[in-house]
Image: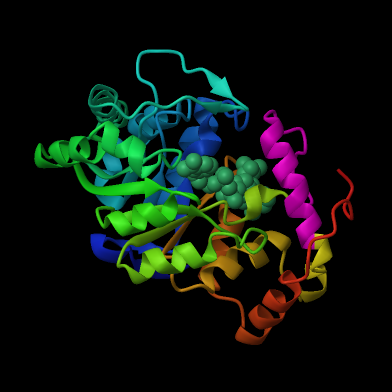
Amino acid sequence: MELPRATLGRTGLEVTRLGFGAMELAPFSSDVDDARAERVLHAVLDAGIRFIDTSPDYGESEQRIGRYLSGRRESFFIASKCGCLVGRQPRREGGIPEHEFTPGNVRAGVEQSLKRLRIETLDLVQFHISPSRTVLEENDAVETLLKLRGEGKLRFLGMSGTLPHLRDHIEMGVFDAFQIPYSALELEHEEALAAAAQAGAGIIVRGGVARGAPAPDHNPQQPLSFFREANQRRRDRWDTADLDELLDGMSRMEFLLRFVLSNPDAHTVIVGTANPDHLQANVRSAARGALPPDLYAEARRRLARPPVPGRSPS
Ligand SMILES: NC(=O)c1ccc[n+]([C@@H]2O[C@H](COP(=O)([O-])OP(=O)(O)OC[C@H]3O[C@@H](n4cnc5c(N)ncnc54)[C@H](OP(=O)(O)O)[C@@H]3O)[C@@H](O)[C@H]2O)c1
């Protein structure tokens, strides 16, 4: 099955439009043992997926990618994050771990990622949790990544960006790629995403299948409450737009994934899963490409309706 490809903006990297998000290999995300992680990671590459996203914050994720995939390094591009605390237990606010963008911590993070991933060079390092321009400047954070790039430790600079800071990040002109939350059920970043693509950056979409919230087999017992609440909002939006009426034989997950693929600015969508069956289903969906244009237009019309909370049971 041939997966559609795109160029990741000015990085020039030729990526598959379906990428893989490795957060789901972390213990806080799902209960996945080493054997399953190994199986899923090999299946990712066997399916032809060429782009993997991870982070030092994702528990064993980096170590598992290093352990199981370092022998297949030529088959994929690897992106990680920086600013995650190294050597200290982060405080957590609403489930989000504390970050620090000082030269020492950014450097330590990149060097730790290289060791954990068992590689010499990261293809992309993204600032985690969308720090403001002021925070970046006060900490010489961009300069630190540029130095590390000069040392051959990374190839491209990225930002995991969200509003309100994302507009400043685009203006800074230093980022080769942006990771942005975007799905049919969360279109809030669509304009900024288009602006980043217009500026020539590569666009990596996260949350593209709305964290699986509308899937019939979705586990609502998500341990982090801020994920739980957001998932309820996603289900409400699905129901308000009556998207089930448009499925025409597709699963909800196929519809969501192909909705993102209908936006040519979304160069790759890093769908996360720890379930091999879900991975195969996502590969089949992505191979079908964008939604038919009339269906896409109708979905957009319906998604413009204001959401009515509480239509779907929590
Ligand atoms: N930069 C950041 O701050 C940040 C934040 C969050 C995530 N990320 C990155 O983005 C990646 C993806 O984002 P995300 O995980 O938040 O959202 P996502 O990819 O929209 O959703 C992942 C969820 O969807 C479920 N899923 C996937 N395919 C499915 C299918 N075919 N059927 C049913 N359920 C399916 C998965 O559960 P199963 O495991 O059960 O399949 C998982 O819980 C992460 O892995 C991570 O790399 C970055």
Q: Is residue 63 magenta?
A: no
State the residue at coordinates (70%, 44%): 230
Q: How is the image coloured?
A: rainbow
Above or below, 119 relative to 311: above
Position of residue 169 measured from the top left corner of the image (x, y, whole percent): 35, 52
Q: Is residue 215 magenta?
A: yes
Q: Nearer the viewer, residue 295 or 288?
A: 295
As drawn, is 79 to the left or to the right of 26? left
As drawn, is 53 to the left or to the right of 182? left
Residue 50 in view of the camera: no
State the residue at coordinates (82%, 69%): 242
State the residue at coordinates (27%, 60%): 13
Q: Quadrant of residue 170?
A: bottom left
Above or below, 301 relative to 33: below
Q: In the displayed orientation, state which residue is furthest to the bottom.
A: 294
Residue 259 in view of the camera: yes
State the residue at coordinates (56%, 58%): 182
Above or below, 16 relative to 67: below
Q: In the displayed orientation, state which residue is furthest to the left.
A: 150
Question: Which quadrant of the figure contains the C terminus?
Answer: top right
Q: Quadrant of residue 292?
A: bottom right
Position of residue 61 measured from the top left corner of the image (x, y, whole percent): 44, 31
Q: Which residue range is magenta in the image? A: 214-238
As drawn, is 217 to the left or to the right of 274? right
How many badges with numbers are in the image?
0
Position of residue 119 measured from the top left corner of the image (x, y, whole percent): 23, 35
Q: Nearer the viewer, residue 25 or 183?
A: 183
Position of residue 166 measured from the top left corner of the image (x, y, whole percent): 43, 53
Above or below, 272 relative to 28: below
